[in-house]
Amino acid sequence: MGEESQPQVGKDLVTYAQASRQLAEAHLGQRDWSGLPVPVAGLNLVLEPRYKHKSLSEFRWKEFYDEHGVRHAIDEPPPPKESEFKTVNSWWNARYQVTIFVVKDKQGRAQFRLLFEDRLAFTIRTLDAAAVWPVEAEKKAQEKLASLIPADAFELYMLTGHFPEISKRSGLTYLFRRGRPTIALRQNEEVNYELCALCLHPIGYYGDTWAGVMCPTDEVVAHLLMMRGSEEKFWANANQHPLDRPAAGL
Amino acid sequence: MENNESPLPGIDVLNTGYGDFELRFDPNKPDEVQKAKETITDMLKRGYAIFVRQGAETFRVRKFDVDKNVYIIGSTPAEEVPIAETRAMAVGRSAGG
């Protein structure tokens, strides 16, 4: 390959975040009002089943270029082997922090398996996914959030990454958090207990992370609007994680 | 921190590349109004959740009346919000999580 055809960093080669912005710009004319999700190597992109570009979840990067413009191939992971076991039941054990699976082999003999959900691995995968969020998009989303909540709540959000709001309809307290599911609590003079973590991502998310395809504050805005304008739909559409599960992000 | 740079009505859409993408239209320009109507109709058809603020309350848009140019947020005529008098917010379909 001659020097002239060498792709240049910043011109021919873009980061995930730059790709996210460029895809959003390029697809506005095609009525993709929410932009396009960007697949990340090594992460499972989960998209809303009726989403127009659902096939993006099947996309796999085959190569990447480092900061010096040097190409590296990405090996295709081997296809999963067909298991001789069939899962017949599973449950979360809060005491041991594991998911227990009961499986049966082809002869019908039952065995059990343990699945450990690693919180640190969740965090590290979320950092990988964060590469797709343009910083400018996060700043813009924060400006939008600032216009929607009281100044003291926004200051709290900037300082700690979360703020509470009480629903006028249900009286529940919601703790909105940047990059983590929203916590729902019942708090009044008589009772004070946590309900669950509500996980909801517009368009899609990266599996086994807390990351959605939109920047974190966009997701906070989405949760806030859903809670205020359609609380029952918020609960219906969100996954409700018990607070001791890693997915709850506590 | 209300954005007062553009007083025009429209829709702010949560967007992967922009964070918050602002679609504005001039209610005095028929071609822009027509484009806004087509956009709102298309968004609702594709399952976007559109929200409007009425005073301190936030409501989810149930329907859009393309003849009257109003968002319908309830079942009575009083629960109609003219598109020329509000900045709505739109969120794409939810994938759970």
Image: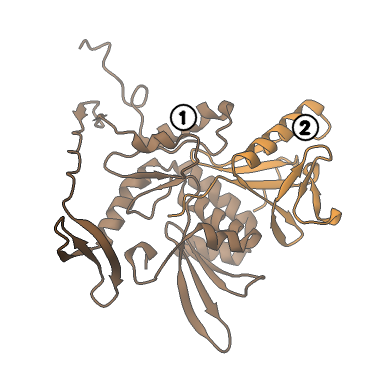
Chain colours: A brown, B orange
Can residue A115 be seen?
no
For mark 1, what is the residue? A22
Name of the residue lying farthest toward the bottom: A190
The picture quadrant where one finds residue A133 is top left
> What type is the residue that disc 1 sits on?
Gln
Query: Residue A79: x and y, percent?
Result: 20, 39
Q: Is residue B45 above or below residue A233?
A: above
Quadrant holding the C terminus of chain A = bottom left
Instruction: Count the labels in the image.
Output: 2
For the residue pair B6 and A80, the one nearer the viewer reads as A80
Quadrant holding the N terminus of chain A = top left
Determine the chain carrying the residue at label 2. Answer: B
The answer to whether A92 appears left or right of A158 in the picture is left
For the residue pair A49 and A45, the one nearer the viewer reads as A49
Label pair 1/2, CB-CB below 8 angstroms: no
The picture quadrant where one finds residue A72 is top left
Q: Residue at x 44, y 41 (%)?
A: A134
Badge number at residue A145: none
Q: Residue at x 74, y 35 (%)?
A: B37
Query: Residue A192: x and y, percent?
Result: 51, 83
For mark 2, what is the residue? B33
Q: Nearer the viewer, mark 1 or mark 2?
A: 2
Can residue A202 be seen?
yes
